[in-house]
Amino acid sequence: MENTGKTKAKKQVLQSPKGMHDILPQDQPLWDRVYRIARDVSEYYNFKHIETPMVERSELFERSIGEATDIVEKQMFTFKTKSRESLTLRPEGTAGIARSYIQHGLGQLGLPLKLYSAGSMFRYEQPQAGRYREFHQIECDIISVESNPIYDAQAILVFCRILEVLKIKDLRVAVNSIGCKSCRPVYRKKLQAYYKSHKRALCAHCVSRLDKNPLRLLDCKEEKCRALREDAPIMIDNLCKVCREHFKHVLEYLDELELPYMLDHYLVRGLDYYTKTVFEIFTGEETVNALGGGGRYDYLIEMLGGKITPAVGWAMGVERVIEHIKTQGINIGIRAKKKIFIIYIGELAKKKALGLIEELRKNNIDVDESLGRESLNAQLRIADKSGAPLALIFGQKEAFEESIIIRDLATGIQETVPLEKMAASVKKKLKNKG
Ligand code: AMP
């Protein structure tokens, strides 16, 4: 058939990469507010801001997170640079912070050193609700001289306080201890022996990680593996004296603070560097998608070549927090700025309009405009839609006379004032409007 030219090839609209999202202008006030609250609360507890690169040497994650973990085995975005160096988009933030601590000798700032950070993380996962390939975390870490349980409790406290200020209700902190260098290997063997004796009842994934990472079998979501774990040995029955005392104190501090915790013997977390306390925070009935999690990592800095320096920290999933705030319709106090709208008529007024905005800026008056449109009606329509309480109308006559019209957009009442009184009159009118 002859091509009439009417059947145009459909233009393909480019999409963002799978599992990665834009944060659009309409959502930014909510994101800003969440970051602001997290910053304010953590600053109160003396956390200092740190930023590390989004990309690190791949070796950093292999050495810290552990080669037999899901993250390192399957989820890293790794690439070679032109000079054949292997780099990875960070899948989590703690390894980079520990690297930076060692590289810059941050211990000199004095211990405890409390660090706050925030940014994008990348994991090659199957995207689903609450799980993306690029997501954002807010992180708090406390690096101290000793492995002191008071900081495990304070870290959990700060996380809970941020969520409370964000008006997130029904918080539940799941806590467990996964022991240390001396007691965990013994427990690991016991657990392995238990599961090996039930190997045929395990799912294929658990069979494959039984040798390398048996602790992860405890948090398998498969029905048959869940049934098996009921009789599996649990870590807290196998803690050494030091770890038992540490965990006891953490729980005592949490009691003292009246934080809503519950013991979860199956909580192990997916990263090798954790020791002793691990925790995750949930809201309401949710049991799968945690708002965040963390734990103690006493050997991480040493594993990366630093002096033995204990630390504890957590990461909050910003997308999960934002989604919860949105679905629950929580009002976290976002107030749109009251702006006034500036309108011009004619070339001379247009030429002077940008200067008028500067005058208003100096007087801390927020201004909106649509200076690219010539028509008065079009500008007025946009001014009405913008929700601005006042419009400033600057026409040919006003430009000659050095005056301006202030129009109340709710009542339509107008007043002409000399330009030198513009800012003061606007302020007065805005004040009267409350
Ligand atoms: P993790 O240390 O892996 O438990 O991550 C801490 C928190 O980050 C989780 O509790 C989630 O809130 C969030 N998070 C982790 N992975 C993802 C992901 N793929 N997409 C969105 N949020 C995530």
Image (spheres, rainbow, N blue to C red):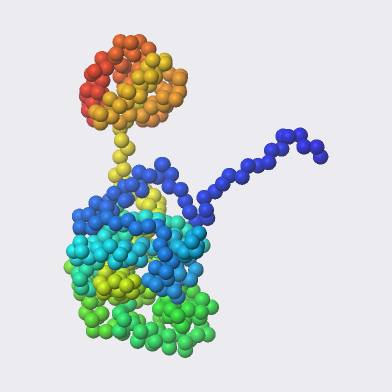
| 361 is higher (above) or lower (below) than 70 | above
The residue lying at 28 percent from left, 26 percent from top is 360
Q: Quadrant of residue 52?
A: bottom left
- The reply to whether residue 369 is visible in this rendering is yes
| Residue 83 pos. (x, y %) | 49, 61
The quarter of the picture where the N terminus appears is top right
Report the front residue among 233 and 120.
120
Report the front residue among 49 and 230.
49
Picture quarter with ligand 1: bottom left
The residue lying at 53 percent from left, 85 percent from top is 200
- The reply to whether residue 124 is visible in this rendering is no
Report the front residue among 155 and 230.
155
| 165 is higher (above) or lower (below) than 255 | above
Q: Quadrant of residue 346?
A: top left
| 260 is higher (above) or lower (below) than 349 | below
Q: Residue furthest front?
A: 83
The residue lying at 29 percent from left, 57 percent from top is 50
| Residue 304 pos. (x, y %) | 34, 71
| 177 is higher (above) or lower (below) than 314 | below
| Residue 206 pos. (x, y %) | 49, 78
| Residue 314 pos. (x, y %) | 31, 64
The residue lying at 41 percent from left, 42 percent from top is 25
Q: Residue furthest right?
A: 1
The quarter of the picture where the C terminus appears is top left
Horizontal placement of 297 versus 192: left or right? left
